Image: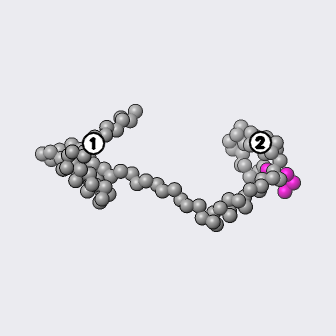
Amino acid sequence: MAKEIKRINIKEAPELRLLAEEVRKDNRVIVLTSEGEELARITPPRARTSRRKITPKAMEAFLSAAGSWKDVDVDKFLANNQKARNCPLLVASNYEISGGH
C-alpha cells in the first residue's frame, strides 16, 4: 500500500523554497545528501494536463456521428455481444451488427 504524501509549508523556510523553485523551474530532480548518503529527493510536480479545446472540425465530426447507429438491430447486437463475451476465441467481425447491411 502506498504511503500518504506528507505536505510541508515552506513559506517561512527560504532555503527550501529556493530549492523547490529551482526544481520546478528546471524540471529536474535534486538529490539531498549528507556525507555521500542520499537522504531525500525533491522532484518537480507532475505537469497539469490541459483540456483540449474543441475545434469546429471536431464538433462537426461529433455531430455527424449522431444517428449513425439508427439502422442497428439492437436486440441482435446485444445477443451477438453476449455470445462474444462467452466465447473468447470468437472474432467480433464474424457478427453482423446492422440491420440488413
Tell me the quarter of the image containing the N terminus.
top left
The residue most toward the bottom is 57
**Residue at screen point 20% across, 46% down:** 13
Give the amino acid type for the residue marked by disc 2 in the picture. Answer: Leu
Task: Judge left or right: residue 17 versus residue 95.
Answer: left
Q: Nearer the viewer, mark 1 or mark 2?
A: 1
Give the amino acid type for the residue marked by disc 1 in the picture. Answer: Asn
Task: Reply yes or no: does residue 100 show up in magenta.
Answer: yes
Q: Where is residue 7 in the image (x, y as percent from the top left)?
A: 31, 40
- Upstream in sequence: badge 1 or badge 2: 1
Front residue of this view, candidates 63 and 39: 63
The residue wearing badge 2 is 78
**Residue at screen point 77% across, 50% down:** 94
CA distance for labels 1 and 2: 55 Å
Task: Judge left or right: residue 37 versus residue 91.
Answer: left
Q: Position of residue 2 (x, y in %)?
A: 38, 35
**Residue at screen point 19% across, 49% down:** 14
Task: Reply yes or no: does residue 12 show up in magenta.
Answer: no
The residue wearing badge 1 is 9
Task: Judge left or right: residue 84 versus residue 12.
Answer: right
Front residue of this view, candidates 1 and 23: 23
Q: How many marks?
A: 2
Task: Judge left or right: residue 78 versus residue 56.
Answer: right
Tell me the quarter of the image containing the C terminus.
bottom right
What is the crowding at mark 2: few (fewer than 14 residues within 10 Å), some, or many (at least 20)?
few
What range is drawn magenta here? Answer: 96-101
- Secondary structure of the residue carrying numbered label 2: helix
Q: Is the magenta stretch mostly helix, strand or loop?
A: loop
Q: Where is residue 67 in the image (x, y as percent from the top left)?
A: 77, 55
